[in-house]
């Protein structure tokens, strides 16, 4: 496994020059956090040698100003306290999981203002732990010498592997990657969508630093659930199948495409004659819902476009679209409801954002396979409806129906908007006039300014305010930033 670090933060417009260091999986960064770390330089370096000084976050307490300083090229930071008195204390905290825990990396460089001075600073400490693929963050903390209260800045990091909106979001996403389990946080299908977001970012930004997560996830999880990334929920299987198609596109490794085929075949086993066709939601749930069938369409069309001489997957994709467009899932406003009733009618359930987006990617992929421009016409009709829907875009910003909050971004719904943005971005690239670029740019600008903290973590509400972050919210934002950057 390797952690690659760009020599130039202008790498978005020039070929990447990388420093790639071998990165064993053990010990974990959290275990190493309290010990001395050496990258370009070792911990406890004097700030007088810093090649830069950027202060992204500050805090105050009892008239004292506490600042975090970052030297981007040194990949280090230090803490300072000003307007203080002798005996005031200042230090750094260092976290390798996005600011969730830092106990073993606490009070680094703790120091006090000496007699005769009104301010002081700590030594410099590394942000990242390259030898262990530790993606770090720092914050500065301090207190008045005669008071117990402590104040800390927000978490922040240097701009290595974070030189643009999307690379910064990808790096923040990887802070939630659990190398021990191969999952992003604890999610199953949301790990598939997070991995796809990460792969897309490699393609869009050119930053390969986290490509190790592809093979590591595959090796860790291939034997989980039903094996080969199948399980009883057919939509889960579809998400994983598409992740491995993306992995194949990036790496060219045949094993990923082979696994995507297993996933598509598993889904096909549960195509039933109920309601005239379609894949059921789960192996033990005959419910015909939109998302499962949209994923089935996209996955089968994608496989056809990557397998020479295929006819099977193309036939399945065509059969799916023929059934889907006539199924009643698309309502009179050209939005897609959740599923069908037992009587095979539109159930009028929620028009989740991901149901409006995955179909667009599927139709674009099927058009690539067939050249049938009617597919793009249908996709444009659906995209026009969702991008202009006041229900889905109150005030002009995409909003998930019943958008969750306070959940730590761990609910399924936290991931939905990202899938929408990804699908819309795929369609936008397939259309010659790129009609949705302005929409994607506007959403990305809003999320960046309204729903982001100092560590480039994103929350559930793109229109703001930032409340809480986690895997679902983070990879949804990364999907959006990828789509905007690629439009």
Image: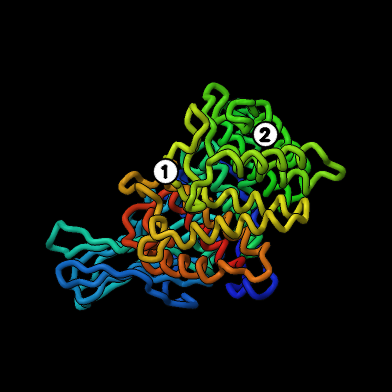
- Image-quadrant location for residue 82: bottom left
Can residue 167 be seen in the rendering of this structure?
Answer: no
In the drawing, what numbered circle is on residue 182? none
Numbered disc in front, either 2 or 1: 1
Is 422 drawn above or below residue 227 in the view shown?
below
Residue 444 or 216: which is nearer the viewer? 444
Q: Label 1: which residue?
A: 350
Is 130 drawn above or below residue 262 in the view shown?
below
In the drawing, what numbered circle is on residue 263? 2
Q: Residues within 10 Å of mark 1 (few under 14, many from 20)?
A: some
Considering every residue shown, the one lying at the far left of the view is 146
- Image-quadrant location for residue 7: bottom right
The quadrant of the picture occupied by the C terminus is: bottom right
Q: How is the image coloured?
A: rainbow
Residue 274 or 434: which is nearer the viewer? 274
Q: Which one is earlier in the sequence, the residue at label 2 or at label 1?
A: 2
Is 289 drawn above or below residue 252 in the view shown?
above
Q: Residues within 10 Å of mark 2 (few under 14, many from 20)?
A: many
């Amino acid at each position: 496994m390797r952690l690659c670090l760009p020599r130039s933060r202008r790498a978005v417009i020039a070929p990447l020059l990388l420093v790639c260091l071998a990165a064993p999986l053990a010990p974990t960064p959290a275990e190493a956090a309290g010990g001395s770390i050496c990258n370009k330089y070792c911990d406890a370096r004097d700030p007088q040698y810093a090649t830069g000084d950027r202060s992204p976050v500050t805090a105050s307490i009892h008239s004292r100003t506490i600042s975090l300083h970052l030297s981007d090229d040194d990949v280090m930071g230090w803490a300072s306290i000003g307007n203080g008195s002798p005996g005031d204390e200042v230090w750094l905290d260092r976290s390798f999981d996005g600011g969730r825990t830092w106990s073993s990396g606490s009070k680094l460089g703790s120091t006090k203002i000496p007699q005769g001075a009104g301010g002081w600073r700590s030594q410099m400490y590394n942000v990242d732990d390259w030898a262990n693929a530790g993606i770090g963050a720092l914050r500065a903390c301090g207190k008045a010498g005669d008071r117990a209260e402590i104040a800390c800045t927000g978490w922040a990091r240097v701009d290595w592997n974070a030189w643009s909106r999307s690379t910064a979001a990808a790096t923040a996403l990887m802070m939630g990657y659990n190398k021990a389990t191969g999952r992003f946080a604890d999610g199953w299908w949301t790990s598939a969508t997070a991995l796809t977001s990460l792969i897309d970012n490699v393609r869009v930004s050119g930053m390969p630093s986290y490509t190790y997560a592809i093979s590591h996830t595959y090796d860790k999880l291939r034997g989980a659930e039903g094996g080969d990334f199948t399980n009883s929920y057919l939509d889960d299987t579809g998400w994983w199948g598409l992740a491995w198609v993306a992995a194949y596109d990036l790496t060219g490794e045949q094993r990923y495409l082979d696994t995507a085929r297993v996933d598509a075949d598993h889904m096909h086993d549960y195509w039933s004659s109920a309601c005239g066709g379609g894949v059921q939601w789960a192996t033990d749930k005959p419910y015909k819902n939109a998302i499962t069938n949209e994923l089935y369409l996209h996955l089968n069309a994608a496989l056809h476009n990557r397998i020479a001489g295929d006819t099977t997957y193309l036939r399945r994709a065509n059969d799916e679209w023929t059934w889907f467009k006539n199924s009643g899932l698309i309502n009179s406003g050209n939005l897609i409801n959740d599923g069908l009733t037992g009587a095979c009618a539109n159930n009028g359930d929620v028009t989740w954002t991901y149901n409006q987006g995955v179909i667009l990617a599927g139709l674009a992929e099927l058009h690539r396979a067939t050249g049938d421009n009617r597919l793009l016409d249908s996709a444009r009709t659906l995209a026009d409806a969702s991008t202009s829907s006041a229900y889905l875009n109150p005030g002009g910003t995409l909003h998930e129906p019943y958008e969750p909050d306070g959940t730590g971004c761990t609910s399924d719904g936290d991931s939905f908007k990202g899938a929408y943005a990804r699908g819309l971005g795929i369609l936008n690239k397939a259309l010659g006039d790129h009609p949705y670029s302005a929409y994607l740019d506007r959403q990305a600008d809003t999320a960046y300014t309204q729903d982001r903290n100092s560590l480039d973590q994103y929350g559930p509400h793109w229109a703001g305010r930032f409340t809480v972050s986690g895997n679902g919210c983070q990879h949804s934002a990364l999907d959006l930033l990828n789509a905007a950057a690629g439009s």
